[in-house]
Image (cartoon, grey):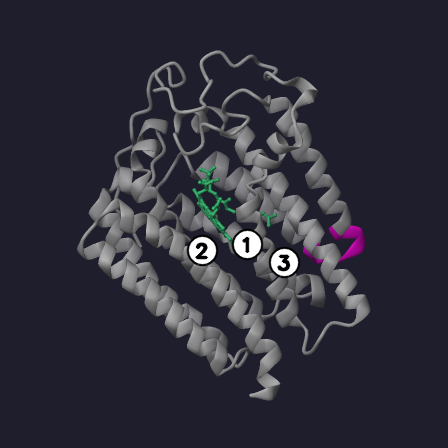
Amino acid sequence: MSTLPHPRPAAPADPVSALPTAPGQRHEAVPAGGRSGWRASWRQYGALTKPRVVQLIIFCALIGMVLALPGLPTAAQAQTMALACAGIWLVASAAAAFNCLIEQRIDARMKRTAWRPTANGELSQARALVFSALLGSAGMGLLYLGVNALTAWLTLATFVGYAVIYTVVLKPMTPQNIVIGGASGAMPPVLGWAAMTGDVGPEAITLFLIIFVWTPPHFWALALYRAEDYARAGLPMLPVTHGNAFTRLQILLYTLVLFAATLLPFVQGMSGVLYLSAAVLLSGRFIHYGWRLWRDYSETLARRTFRFSIVHLSLLFAALLADHYLRPWM
Ligand code: HEM
Ligand SMILES: CC(C)=CCC/C(C)=C/CC/C(C)=C/COP(=O)(O)OP(=O)(O)O
C-alpha cells in the first residue's frame, strides 16, 4: 500500500568497525573460519534455524493438511502428514540458516540479531552453509520421495523465495521487501494442502492470502521499535524510509484488509460460525491495536502489537482446526 519513492538509509563506510558494541557482540575480529570450527554446539546450529518462527510455519502447514481432508486422517494419511511436516520443517530451517549466513554482517550491526552465532563469529559462514545444505537436501528428499513431487517443488520455490529473492534481492532494495517477500512466508498452508491432495485448491489460496496480508502489520510493528537497528544496518525498512507515522498508517490499513481476508474461509464455506466468531474477535482486536498505534505511538504499544500479531495468527489457525472437526456437531 505504499508506493512513494524512498530515500535509502546510508550504510556506514566500514560497517563492521563502525558498530556500537551490543551485549554479547564480538564482531570486531571474526576469523574467516569462525571461532568454534566443527565443535560448535547443537544450540548454536539450532539458533540459526529461527525455531519459534518455524514452529508457527509448521503449525500453519499442518492446518493446511487437516483442512484438505474431509474427516480424520487414515493411518496412511497421518504418515504422509508426519513426513510432510518433517520435510517442510527441515527446508524452512535450512532457509532460516541460509538467511543467517547471508546476513552475517547485517546481523552483527543490529542489537536484536548481534547474538546470532554467525554474527558474533561463533559459527563460520562455511559451516552455516553446510548445515543449511544438509537440512535442505534431507527435507527435499523426504518431500520428493515420501510425499509428492508438487509439494517438493513448491517447497523449493518457497526456499528460493525467502532465502534468495527476499534475503538477497528485495531486503536491501525496497521497503516493499516484506510485502513481496511475504509471499514465501504465506506458502506453508499451500504446501500442506498440496501434500495431502497433490493439488492447490482455492481454499489453500485463501489461507495463503490471510498470511500474506498478515505479514506487513506483523513485521512493521516490530520494525517501528527496531527502526534504529535497521537504519544502522542500512536496510530500507518502511519506518526508516517513510517514517514512523506513515508506517503506522500502513499497519492500520493492512489490519483492515486482514479483517476482510479472514472472513473468506466462512464466505467460501470452508469454515463455519465457530471460525467466523474467532476471526471477527481476533481481527477486530488487531484493528484495535492498529488504531491505537496510529493515534498515539509508544514503543510499548508497538511491541504489544507485534506480540499480538503472533497470537492472532496462532489462534486464527487453531480456530480453523477446531471448526473443521467440531462443525459436524454444531
Ligand atoms: C517475510 C515475512 C516475515 C518477516 C519479514 C518476518 C519478520 C520477523 C522478525 C524480524 C521477527 C523477530 C525475530 C527475532 O527477533 O528473532 C519475527 C518473529 C516472529 N515471526 Fe515473523 N516474519 C515474517 C513472516 C512470518 C511468518 C510467515 C510466520 C509464521 C507463520 C512468522 C512468525 C513469527 C514468530 C512466531 C515470531 C516470534 C519469534 C520469537 O519469539 O522468537 N513470521 N518475524
Ligand atoms: C520452505 C519454507 C516453508 C520456508 C519458509 C521461509 C521462512 C523461514 C519464512 C519466515 C519468514 C521469516 C523468518 C522472516 C524473518 O525476517 P528476516 O529474515 O528479515 O528477519 P531477521 O532480521 O530476524 O533475519
> What secondary structure is marked by label 2?
helix
Please state which of residues 315 and 158 is positioned toward the viewer in this rendering.
315
Indicate which disc residue 309 carries.
none
Report, in whole angstroms, how far the alpha carbon at label 2 lies from the one at label 1: 9 Å
Closer to the chain start, of discs 2 and 3, is 3
Disc 1 residue: CB within 8 Å of ligand 1: yes
**Residue 148 lies within the magenta run:** yes
Residue displayed at 65% across by 24% down: 40
From the top left corner, tell me how far across and down residue 268 is, in percent: 50, 79
Q: Magenta segment, which residues?
A: 143-151
Residue topped by disc 3:
191
Disc 3 residue: CB within 8 Å of ligand 2: yes
Kindly tell me whether residue 46 is visible in this rendering: yes
Amino acid bearing label 3: Leu
**Residue 146 lies within the magenta run:** yes
Q: Are marks 2 and 1 in contact (CB under 8 Å)?
A: yes
Residue topped by disc 1:
56
Q: Is residue 318 left or right of residue 40?
A: left
Report, in whole angstroms, how far the alpha carbon at label 1 lies from the one at label 3: 14 Å
Q: Is residue 214 left or right of residue 125?
A: left
**Magenta residues, dominant SS class:** helix
Amino acid bearing label 1: Leu
Closer to the chain start, of discs 1 and 3, is 1
Residue topped by disc 2:
310
Residue displayed at 36% across by 45% down: 222
Amino acid bearing label 2: Ile
> What secondary structure is marked by label 3?
helix
Give the quadrant of residue 324.
Answer: bottom right
> What secondary structure is marked by label 1?
helix
